């Protein structure tokens, strides 16, 4: 039997051990976030008073609504195309073709390089004078002018896919490899052709993994900052707007409101992600 | 069938061709941005519309080193990364120990809270951090920028170290005590070797996070604390593509080195969730 005082002291020691981490969390994250929330309710440039004007802008100002729809469409587009890329890739890699180790490592490449550097490389490669257009002009005889990829919406989605599809691909690959092959073999024995096995057996079984990965990709694309900053051109999604409103226009209150909206959105997506993770194979 | 005919047969096998060209296309899609950056950093008079530059030069690297002050910037980046690693590790050691080995109510919730700064785009709370630092005169100081990095690096370190400490089997320690080891010997000969890999990987993650960090640095930096990522961004903004390419190459050499070092241990499929980039 434990002496009551003992437990009290144990708890105190635990709290003491946790204190640096808690201090860091509160000082470097929670308190800044709190300041941002408070600032978002203040009139621009003032230290006192409350207003909902900055949030009302999201409903009233068409420019702000456009920002939201831009951010969402980029994220949705990136997610959809990431899934479209990841599924065939995972299915192919599962068969372990020659050099599949190299391919698996190259999936990690976008995750390990700073986004800024990748953005620079993507800009160079896909520019009107870059290798991509050089190749297209050589190969497609009907093309007279270089294709504009940089600073366009499809180009931006192309970049986002390059950067964020690994999150989808990795979970897809791991769900795929966790599959028991005997189920597919049983289906083939029962008379299904390869396509039917794929459609009716494999895809439904890996759905949770693909879903989890695509939520991750969506979150990354929604919160992307350095990439649209450098490659967005005239298109400025929410994160870039937060930055420009704070540092360029010096409208810290408006920027804070946008930051709060973004934070709430991301926490929502995160909750969805956690829910998806808990789902058993449907 | 002769070997040659077998080869030709297999190459012409339509499905194989499709699969391999898809894989090749994918590999090119992935690798070309880095290739072209590399070439651009060494190219002379390459204004596009050619596969290769007209000449090769080290001018851009020279420019980066002499005019853009890359050595100073590299020094800044490393100092800040060192500070960030030190502070993060100091925070993570006791916190990770508590999370890994002590009884804590709602441990899951606490862990999720600690990981929150990595789950939300840094720009959302970077504003608040900048405001606080302005008040505390921490802007444009090594400590300030390092602290901003700690916000993002410490959660990693705590996660890794809590897993490391959780995996520490105290029975090994008991066995060593039974064999006659003093507490000090127990620590240095038993515990330390067991936790060293975990501490090492936490240091590597923290260092990489701080070294590559851009968003937080952008909000807390000043003329004395320009880091490599920020300088590269400024060079791109100035329109100096070739110099930016040179800076980019300089920047990613450590990341590539680390990737090469750990690629044996890595199973890419297991590495998912919670690994947000810059």
Image (cartoon, coloured by chain):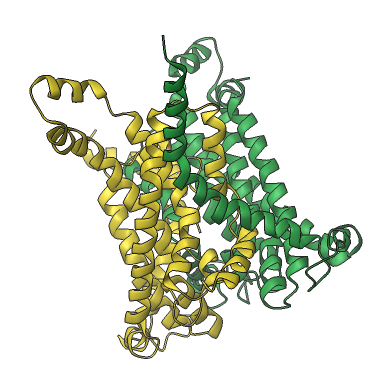
Chain colours: A green, B yellow
Q: Residue at x 42, y 13 (%)?
A: A2
A138 lies left or right of B257: right
Q: Quadrant of residue A96?
A: top left
In the image, is B187 to the left or to the right of B235?
A: left
Q: Using the rendered image of the protein, determine whether residue B72 is visible from the camera's viewpoint.
A: yes
On the rendered image, what quadrant is the N terminus of chain B found in?
A: top left
Q: Position of residue A187 (x, y in %)?
A: 53, 14
Q: Nearer the viewer, residue B1 or A229?
A: A229
Q: Is residue B80 above or below residue A11?
A: below
Q: Position of residue B26 (x, y in %)?
A: 46, 52
**Front position in the image: A23 or B126:** A23
Which residue appears at 38% of the width and 54% of the height? B206
Q: Quadrant of residue A224?
A: bottom right
Residue B102, position in %: x, y? 41, 28
Give the residue furthest to the right.
A60
> Which residue occupies the foreground of this view, B256 or A124?
B256
Q: Is residue B197 above or below residue B175?
A: below
In the image, residue B142 sits, relative to residue B114, either above or below, namely below
Tell me if residue B57 can be seen. Answer: no
Which residue is the extreme one toward the left?
B180
Q: How many marks?
A: 0
Residue A125 location in percent, x, y? 49, 70
Q: Observer-nearest residue: A276 or B147?
A: B147
């Amino acid at each position: 039997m434990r002496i009551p005082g003992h437990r009290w002291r144990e708890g105190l020691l635990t709290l003491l051990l946790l204190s640096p981490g808690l201090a860091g969390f509160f000082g470097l994250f929670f308190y800044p976030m709190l300041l941002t929330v408070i600032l978002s309710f203040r009139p621009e440039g003032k230290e006192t008073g409350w207003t909902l004007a900055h949030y009302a802008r999201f409903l009233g100002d068409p420019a702000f609504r456009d920002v939201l729809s831009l951010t969402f469409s980029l994220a949705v587009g990136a997610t959809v195309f990431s899934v479209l890329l990841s599924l065939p890739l995972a299915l192919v890699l599962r068969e372990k073709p020659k050099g599949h180790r190299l391919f698996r490592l190259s999936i990690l490449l976008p995750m390990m390089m700073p986004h800024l550097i990748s953005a620079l490389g993507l800009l160079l490669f896909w520019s009107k004078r870059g290798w991509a257009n050089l190749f297209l002009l050589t190969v497609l005889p009907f093309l007279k002018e270089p294709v504009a990829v940089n600073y366009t919406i499809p180009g931006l989605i192309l970049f986002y896919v390059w950067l964020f599809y690994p999150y989808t691909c990795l979970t897809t690959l791991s769900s795929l490899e966790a599959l028991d092959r005997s189920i597919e073999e049983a289906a083939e024995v029962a008379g299904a052709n390869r396509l039917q096995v794929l459609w009716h057996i494999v895809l439904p079984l890996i759905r949770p993994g693909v879903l989890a990965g695509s939520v991750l990709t969506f979150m990354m694309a929604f919160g992307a900052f350095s990439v649209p900053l450098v490659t967005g051109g005239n298109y400025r999604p929410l994160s870039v707007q937060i930055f420009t409103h704070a540092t360029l226009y010096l409208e810290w209150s408006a920027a804070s409101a946008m930051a709060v909206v973004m934070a709430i959105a991301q926490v929502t997506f995160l909750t969805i992600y956690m829910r998806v993770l808990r789902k058993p194979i449907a | 069938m002769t070997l040659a005919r077998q080869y030709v047969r297999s190459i012409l096998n339509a499905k194989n061709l499709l699969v391999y060209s898809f894989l090749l296309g994918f590999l090119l899609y992935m690798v070309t941005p880095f290739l072209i950056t590399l070439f651009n950093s060494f190219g002379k008079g390459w204004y596009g519309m050619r596969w290769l530059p007209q000449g090769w030069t080290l001018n851009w690297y020279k420019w980066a080193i002499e005019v853009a002050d890359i050595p100073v910037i590299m020094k800044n980046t490393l100092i800040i990364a060192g500070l960030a690693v030190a502070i993060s590790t100091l925070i993570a050691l006791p916190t990770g120990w508590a999370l890994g080995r002590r009884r804590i109510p709602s441990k899951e919730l606490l862990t999720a809270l600690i990981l929150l700064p990595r789950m939300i785009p840094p720009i959302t709370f970077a504003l608040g951090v900048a405001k606080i630092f302005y008040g505390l005169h921490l802007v444009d100081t090594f400590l300030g920028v390092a602290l901003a990095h700690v916000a993002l690096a410490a959660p990693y370190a705590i996660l890794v170290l809590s897993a490391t400490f959780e995996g520490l089997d105290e029975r090994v320690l008991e066995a060593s005590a039974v064999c006659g080891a003093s507490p000090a010997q127990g620590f240095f000969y038993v515990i330390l070797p067991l936790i060293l890999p975990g501490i090492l990987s936490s240091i590597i993650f923290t260092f990489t996070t701080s070294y590559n960090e851009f968003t937080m640095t952008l909000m807390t930096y000043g003329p004395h604390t320009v880091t490599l990522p920020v300088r590269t961004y400024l060079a791109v903004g100035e329109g100096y593509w070739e110099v930016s390419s040179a800076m980019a190459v300089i920047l990613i050499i450590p990341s590539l080195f680390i990737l090469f070092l750990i690629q044996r241990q890595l199973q890419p499929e297991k590495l998912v969730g919670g690994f947000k980039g810059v």
